[in-house]
Amino acid sequence: MEVDMKIKKFFLYFTIILSILSFGSLSQAGDYPDRPISVVVAYNPGGATDFQARLVTMMAAHPKKDYLGQPIVIINKPGAGGKVGWNWFASKARNDGYDLAAYNVPHFISQSIVFDDTKYNIDNLEPIANWGADPAVLIVGPDSPFNSVADLLKFAKANPGKVTFSGAGKFVGHHIAFLQFQKASGTKLTYVPHTGGVPALAAVKGGQVMAGFNNLSDAYRSQKDIKILAIADLQREATFLPNVPTLKEEGVDVDNSSVNFRGIMAPKGTDPKIIEFLAAKVPLMFNDKKTLKQMKKGGSPVRIMNRAEVQAMWKARKVSLTKLLAGLAP
Amino acid sequence: MEFLSYFSNVFTFTNLLILFLGTVGGLLMGAAPGLSPTMAVALLIPFTFKMSPEQGLIMLGAVYTSTVAGGAISAILLKIPGAPANIATVMDGYPMAKAGKPKEALHYCFISSFIGGVIGIFILIFFTPVLAGFALKFGPSHMFWIAIFGVTVIATLDSNSIIKGLFSGAIGLWLATIGYDSVLGVERFVFNPIFSGGINIIAALVGLFAIPQVLSMLESKQNISDQFEMEKRSLSQSVLYNISRIKALTVGSISGVIIGLIPGAGGQIAGLVSYDQIKKISKNKENFGKGEPDGIIAAESANNAMVGPSLVPLLTLGVPGSPTAAVLLGGLLIHGMFPGSNLFTVYAETTWTFIDSLLIAQLMMLVFGLYISGLAKYVIKTPANYMAAAITILAIFGTYSVQHNFADVIVMLFLGVSMFFLSKFGFTAAPIVLGLILGPIAETNFTQAKIIADTQNGIFSYLTSGPLNLTIISLCIISITYGFITEMKKKKND
Amino acid sequence: MIEIKNLTTVIITLILSILLAFVSFTGGASEAYLFPKIITSTMIILSSLSLLFYFFEKNQIIAKIDMIKLSVYLILIILFILFGEIVGFYFSATLIFLTVCYYYSENKATKIIVYNLLVTVFFMLFIYFLFSVLLKVQVPRFFLL
C-alpha cells in the first residue's frame, strides 16, 4: 500500500513538472518563424513530389540569404493517392504557420470533386507559391510502329478500343490528359491505371501497353528507352524537350488542364500576416540560383508562380475539371 | 574488371567512416523492432543532402544491406522479424535460440548473409548489361502468376495445419483489399477513416509479430533465457558447418537473385520463397520449424542475395526491384544522377565506387555481426518486463515513423492484440503477412491484365500465352504437387 | 483464465468468414469487389472443411489465456489508442514503460522502483535521441513535450 502511495505521488509530481515545462516553452513565442517549419508531402519518399520538395526547400535556412531563416523539414504522409496526407492537413494541421504542405494540381482538386469523403477543397487551403509544372507527355515504346500522333490516331480510328494507355492511377494528371485526348480526337481508347508513374513508364518501355501518358520529367530521363510524341500543355517545354510538339500543334485540341503543378500551401485560418510573409519569401527561395541549378540537373521543369497566380489557377482548374469529370465518379 | 579500379576511392578516411557508421547503425536499426530497411533508408535521405553524391550513396547502400541482415537479429532472439524479408528466419532461428543456441543461429545468419550478399553484388557487377532488360519482360500477367506462386508457399508455411495456414493467408489477402485502390480508384471496407490509407505492411508486421510476443512474455513472466541452458559454440565450428551447407546456400542465393531482378514488391518474399524450396528438397524435412540451421542459411542468403540484383533494374532503367530500392531511386535523383546508361559513363566513378562500397559493407557487416553475436545472451537475459515495455515503445514509435500516421499505430496495436488471441486458436502470423504482401500484387496485376486482355483475345489467353507465363505457371503446379506429395508421405508415416 | 477448445476455434473461423463474406458481397461495384468475393468464399470453404474435420477429432483444450494478468497491459493499450495522439507520445510512452516495468515485476521493493525510474529515463532519452534527434521524426507532442 505504501508503495502504491509513493507511485501515485510520483506520477502526480511528474505530471506537474511536465506541464510546467511545456507551458514554459510555449510562452516564449517570438517572431515567425522561430523554429523549423514542416512541409507535409502526401506521397512516398523518393517520389517526384518528395524529392522536388526537398530540393526547392533546401535553401530555406541559408545563413547568407534572407529567406525564412529556419529550416524546412519534409514529412511524408502517403496513402490513398494523396488523400491520407491532405485529409490530415485540411482537418488536423495547426494553422500557426509551422504546418505547411505540398499540393499537386490536378490531383487534389479532382479528388475533391470525385470523392465525397475528402476533407479538402480549394476553399479550405491557402496557396503560398508554385515551384514546378510537370506536363503530361504522350509516349510510346522504343519499337512502337507509331512515330507521330497522326500514326497513333490513324490506328486508333481503325481499331476502336484497341490502343492501351498506361498512367499513374485514376483521376491524376495522366488520366485527365487521357480523357481530354480521347474526347478531342474523337477516338475510343483504353486506359490501364498503374500504381504510380514509375511502373506506368516501365509498362510502356517493356511494351506491356501500346502508349502512355507520363510525367515530362520522368520521360525526359528515359528518352533512350521511349519515344516522346507530344506534350499536353499550351506551349512547348523549352528547357528539356524543345523539339516535342504540343498536342494542339498536332491537331488535337487539348489544353493544360492535366499539367501537374506542384507548390506549397497553408491550412485555412493561418494568420494573414504569416501567409503574406511566406507568399513574399517563398517564391524568392524557389528562384535561388543553386536551387534552379539542382532542379535542372534533376530534369525537373520549374514554373514559379506567386500566390495570386496560383489562386487564379486553382479556380480555373476546378471549373474545367468539374466539367471533364462529370459522370466519371467511381 | 572496371570495378577493381575504383576500390581505392572507397578507402578514404571519410568514406570508410561513413561506411562503418552506416553498417553498424543499419545493423542496430534493423534489429530494433519497428524499424524496417525501407524506412531506415527513407529517414536517412535528408542526411545525404549535405554529402557528396558518392558519400550519400555509400551511406544509403551500407544501410540498405545491413538493415536487411540486422532484421534477422530480432527475428532470432525475440521472434520479431525486423522486416518482411526476415519472417522465414523466425521459423528456425527462434527455436534455435530457445534451445540455447542463439549465438550459433546468429553466426549462420551473418555468414550466410555475407555469402549471399557477395554473390548478389557480383551478379550486379558482371551481369548488369545482360540482365538490364529482364525486369521489363514482366507484364501484368507474369506478375499475377508470381503472386500466385507466392500463395502456393502459404499452404506449406504452417507446418501444423494446412487449413489454418491457408485460412490465415486468406485473412491477409482480405486485409490487403482494405483502403483506396489506385487502379480502380475506389475505396473498399473503409468503415472508419483510420482505414482509408489501407493496412500498411510494416505496421501489420510489427503488430502481428511484436505485440503477441510481448503479451506472451507478460503472461508467462518468463525471460527467454529461463527456458534453457546456453550452449558454448566457437566461431570456426559455425563457419565450417555453414560453408558445408552448399545446398541451402545455393537454393537461397539463386532464389534471392531471381526474385531481386523481378520488379515490384517481390524482394520482400525472397526469404520465404527460398525457405519453402529448401524445406521441400531437404532430406530432413521434419526438422524444419524446430531449429534446422538450413532454414536460417537459405532464408538469410536469399535476403542478402536479393540486394545486388534489385539494383540492376534500378540503375539501368529506373525500375526498382524492391521497395527499398524505390526509395534509393529518390536518393539518386536528389543528386542529379538519372538511372540509365549515364550512370556507367558520365557518373561511372560515383556508380562504381558505390558498388565497390557495397562489397566492403558486406565484409564490415560480417565482422561486426559476428562480434555482436557474442552479446546475444545479454539481450535474452533482459528481464521480461523491461523487454516487453521496450518492445512496445519501439513498436509504437517505429510504426508512427513509417508514414507519420497515428492511424497506423492504432492498426498495429489492434492487429497485434487480435493476433495474440488468434495464435491461441492455432493460427500463425507469417501467412497473414505474406497474404498482405501478395494480395495487392495479385489484384492490381489481374485488374490491369483484364483491361489489357479485353482489347485482345480475352483474359484466359492473355494469362496463359507466352513462354514466361507458362514457365511461372508450371512452377506453381510443381510447388503445389510437391507440397501435396510431402503431405501425403507425412500422413502415411504417421 | 479463459480456456480455448477446438470447437471454439472452428466456430469462430466460421463466423469470421461469414461476416467478411457478407461485407464483401454487399460492397457495391462488382468489378472492385471481385477479389474480396473470391477470398471470402475460399475462407467459407476452408472453415466448413475444418468443421467437417472437427467431428473426427476429440474436443481438447488447446490453449489457456490468463486474462487477469494481461488486463493491465491491454488497458494501457486502449488508453494509448484513445489519448496517445492528444497527450503526446513521449508522455504516454513514459507512463506505459513505467507501469509495465512496475506491474509486471515480481519484486516490488522501493529499490526496484528507483531502478525502474532510472531505466525509464535512460530508455526514453534513447528513444528521443533515435527518433527525434537522429531521424527527425515528428511524433505527436503535448505542446512541446
Image (cartoon, grey):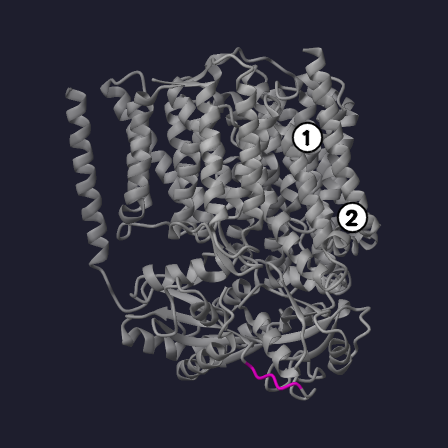
Spot occupied by residue B93 in the image (x, y as percentages of width and height): 60, 24
Horizontal and vertical percent position of residue A101 = 41, 66
Q: How dense is the environment of label 1, judged by Cα within 10 Å: few (below 14), some, or many (20 and up)?
A: many
The disc at residue B275 is 1
Q: Residues within 10 Å of mark 2 (few under 14, many from 20)?
A: many
Could you tell me if residue B21 is visible in this image? no
Q: Left or right? Give the position of B22 relative to B391.
A: right
Between B331 and B467, which is closer to the camera in this rendering?
A: B467
Q: Position of residue B287 (x, y in %)?
A: 67, 17
Which mark is on residue A329? none
| Residue occupying the point 54% across, 77% down | A289
The quadrant of the image that shows the N terminus of chain C is top left
SS label for mark 1: helix
A17 in magenta: no
Position above or below: B169 against A221: above
Numbered mark located on residue B469 in the image: 2
Magenta part mainly helix, strand or loop? loop
Residue drawn at the location 30% of the way across and 73% of the way down: A274
Subunit that carries the residue with mark 2: B
What's under tag 2, amino acid-wise?
Asn
Q: Amino acid at mark 1?
A: Tyr
Query: A208 left or right of B218?
Result: right
Q: Which residues are magenta?
A: A252-256
Q: CA distance from mark 2 to mark 1?
A: 23 Å
Quadrant for residue A281, please give it.
Answer: bottom left
Q: Residue A191: image x %, image y %?
A: 64, 67
Chain where mark 1 sits: B
> In this rendering, is residue A37 above or below C104?
below
